[in-house]
Image: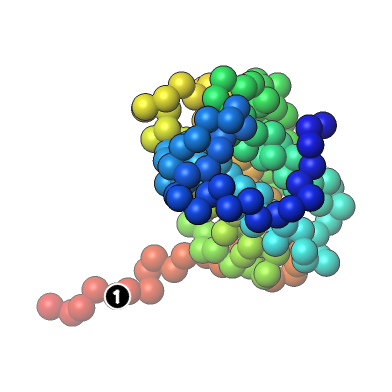
Amino acid sequence: MGKRLSKIYTRTGDDGQTGLGDGTRVAKDSLRVTAYGTTDELNSTLGLVLSSDSIPDPVREVLVQLQHDLFDLGGELCIPGMAMVHDADVTRLEDTLDRFNADLPALREFILPGGGPAAAHCHLARTVCRRAEREVIALARSEPVRPEAIRYLNRLSDLLFVLARVLARADGHGEVLWQHERRKKPAS
C-alpha cells in the first residue's frame, strides 16, 4: 500500500482543485470527481444500513462485500484507465440478486421506501446508487469509462431494491405498498 495520511488537512484543495489517483489536478466539481464522490456517498449509505442490529447475517455479508466493491469502483473512477470492477463482479451481483429474490413474492404493486429503518436505509442506498449510475454515464459521455462500471451500478441498484424487500420482511415491518387507488376521481 502507498503512503498513509498522517496529516488529514493538506490545503491543496483550497483553490477548488483536487488530485486524482494518478496525480492529475482537476476541478472538485468535475464529472469524474462527482462520479466517484457519489460512489463514496453510496458506500456511506451502505454503512448506514449496516448500522442496524436487525440485519440477517447473509445480508450483512453481502453488504460488507458491496462496500469493498464500491471502494474498488471509486478507485477505478479516481484513476483514469484503472480496471478494478470486472464482469465477474457483475455476475456475482446477478447471482446474489437471484438468490435473495427467489423467496420473495412476485411484485403486484409498487413499493414505497420504508418497511423499517434498515429497509428504508437500503431504499436510500438504492436511490444514491441510481444517481451514481447517472453520473458515471454522464462522465462516460466525455471521458473513457469502462462499461463494467456502469453495468455494476445498474445491477447493484436492482440488488439493493431486493435487499430492501428482504430487510422489510426480516424486520417484521413488511413492505409499504403504493396505494394507487387512494385518490378517488371526483364525481361528475
Q: Is residue 52 left or right of residue 158?
A: right
Would residue 9 appear left or right of 180 to someone viewing this image? right
* Quarter placement of the C terminus: bottom left
Residue 62 appears in view? no
The residue that appears at 58% across and 44% down in the rendered structure is 39
Residue placed most toward the observer, 147 or 172 = 147
> Is 164 above or below relative to 81?
below
Q: Nearer the viewer, residue 186 or 22?
A: 22
> 62 and 6: which one is in front?
6
Where residue 52 sits in the image (x, y, percent)?
77, 66
For the residue labelled by badge 1, is the local secondary structure a helix, a strand or a loop? Answer: loop
Q: Is residue 117 visible?
A: yes
Left or right, residue 14 beside residue 104:
left
Q: Position of residue 131 (x, y in %)?
A: 47, 47
Instruction: Please provide percent x and percent y for residue 140.
Output: 42, 28
The amino acid type, in three-letter code, at marker 1 is Lys
- Residue, x 72% and y 44% (percent of image)? 67
Q: Tell me what residue is drawn at x 60 percent, y 27 percent.
A: 22
Looking at the rendered structure, the number of numbered marks drawn on it comes to 1
Which residue was labeled with disc 1? Answer: 184
Q: Residue furthest bottom?
A: 187
Query: Can you name the residue that lies furthest to the left here?
Result: 188
In the rendered image, the quadrant that contains the N terminus is top right
- Residue visible at 63% across and 51% down? 10
Q: Quadrant of residue 47?
A: bottom right
